[in-house]
């Protein structure tokens, strides 16, 4: 197999949720900022930003949105936002902003930019011997995140990243075979999946998640049975919130 | 500054659009598949897949969606998709799939998973001496991409990645200062942005994009003036298409 430092870290990826109290040095922060700066972005618009949360009270409030108290203890907490605000402001200053032009395309371009930045930052962190956890859980209450961080119109919080020097030693969480996720030219028929993932299902059933140290996690199929058992009401109005942030999601007639 | 092989590549990031005809060796492909496999995913659901497009006719058809003929010439063309289809199928097989449960939360979790995979794959590619281009342009006509790749219900194409051995030597595209994109605890007031980005605006105006080798690109503010001059009708019905792929985006009453 082709290997190098970058790939070694990628293949050894684990999520870390507990950290030493050591602060992350400012020179590391400066490096990570450069990594964000040079990340690819849709048509070069750089439509994403980062809010670094250093205020302990604010961290605690974000951790409450995440419903994960370890978030408040992480040395670093960064919130990545889809950000058309700065670019809209510039367009307004050159007198060329049309109502409704912060549209579906611009929203998803910015959303994607923010996600690319999260993973690029994450790779940099892991390469420097730090560990972290990506926080989709800020999506539990994005309206509250908008309020806490004073996010203006034409922005939206996408993902958080908590990181520091790991203070735990978790197992790698098992993954399904790429036979189920990598296809050539065409998506295959899906049939007898439960039988096909039986080995993976068993493997996941023997994995210990450090969050519940004495309890095995559910089999993968059981996790999915719970995940699709009902719609998730908590996040169902997210598109309405995106619209209230100024984005035009209205379909054409 | 903190540095290592991973970060050196990240800070030297350039987009490459022209490649030698050398095929990417299968051992590299196998490594990249492992990188995708071990990428972080929302609550471990691994809700993304890759379609590797090897059929020349199909590549040509995708390049027409992208309106970029170089896409058809790239040695490798991968389409990253938000994929709830496999997981929904498993939930159905254990008789636990509720109508409407492929909802806003599941769509965005899968969309984010696909984006994280794109960047992680991209970092692996660059670390191995390859180069590539992320293709948001598959979004010009996602319905056509769905048709061409036979993408089933509960999937959606997110981004493409074309890559190979670079056969060109582009400049690094200038980036704005992180002073405008990295904030502490709170998003700042935006004011006099045009004045503040004046240096960057000038710098972008001297950059040569290899796609139009004899022509300088627009100043950044001019690019934005065009970008926000009107809504983008071509992509405005994307949410309708996502719904027609089986996702429940309907807000709660």
Image: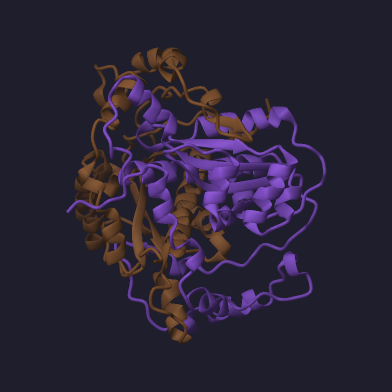
Chain colours: A purple, B brown
Q: Where is residue B207 in the image (x, y as percent from the top left)?
A: 36, 17
The quadrant in which residue A36 appears is top right
In the rendered image, is residue B125 in sight? no
- The residue at the far front in this view is B253
Left or right: residue A123 compared with residue A192: right
Q: Give the camera-side residue of A42 and B55.
A: A42
Q: Position of residue A201 (x, y in %)?
A: 58, 78
The quadrant in which residue B85 appears is bottom left
Q: Where is residue A94 in the image (x, y as percent from the top left)?
A: 32, 19
Q: Assign the N terminus of chain B to one quadrant of the image.
A: top right
- The residue at the far right in this view is A21
Position above or below: A178 against B25: below
Q: Assign the C terminus of chain B to one quadrant of the image.
A: bottom left
- The residue at the far left in this view is A253
Q: Give the camera-side residue of B243 and B191.
A: B191
Q: Give the camera-side residue of B3 and B41.
A: B41
* Residue name at image x 21 percent, y 41 percent: B67
Q: Give the camera-side residue of A181 and B31.
A: A181
In the rendered image, is residue B115 in sight? yes
Q: Where is residue A192 in the image (x, y as percent from the top left)?
A: 42, 84
Left or right: residue A59 compared with residue B38: right
Left or right: residue A86 compared with residue B143: right
* Residue name at image x 33 percent, y 56 percent: B157
């Amino acid at each position: 197999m082709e290997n190098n430092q970058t790939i070694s870290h990628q293949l050894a990826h684990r999520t870390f949720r507990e950290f030493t109290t050591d602060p992350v040095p400012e020179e590391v922060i400066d490096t990570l900022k450069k990594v964000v700066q040079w990340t690819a972005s849709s048509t070069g618009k750089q439509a994403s930003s980062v809010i670094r949360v250093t205020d302990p009270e604010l961290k605690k409030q974000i951790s409450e949105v995440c419903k994960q108290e370890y978030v408040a203890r992480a040395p670093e907490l960064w919130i990545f936002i889809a950000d058309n605000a700065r670019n809209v402001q510039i367009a307004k200053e050159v007198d060329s902003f049309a109502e409704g032009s912060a549209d579906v395309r611009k929203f998803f371009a910015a959303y994607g930019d923010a996600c690319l930045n999260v993973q690029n930052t994450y790779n940099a962190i892991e390469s420097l011997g730090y560990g972290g956890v990506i926080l989709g859980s800020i999506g539990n209450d994005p309206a509250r995140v908008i309020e806490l961080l004073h996010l203006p119109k034409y922005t939206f919080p996408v993902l958080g990243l908590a990181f520091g020097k790991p203070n735990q030693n978790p197992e790698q969480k098992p993954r399904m075979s790429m036979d189920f996720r990598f296809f050539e030219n065409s998506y295959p028929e899906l049939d007898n999946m439960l039988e096909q993932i039986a080995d993976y299902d068993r493997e996941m059933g023997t994995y210990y998640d450090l969050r519940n140290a004495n309890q095995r996690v559910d089999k993968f199929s059981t996790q999915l049975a719970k995940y699709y058992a009902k719609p998730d009401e908590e996040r169902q109005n997210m598109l309405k919130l995106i619209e209230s942030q100024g984005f035009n999601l209205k379909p054409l007639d």
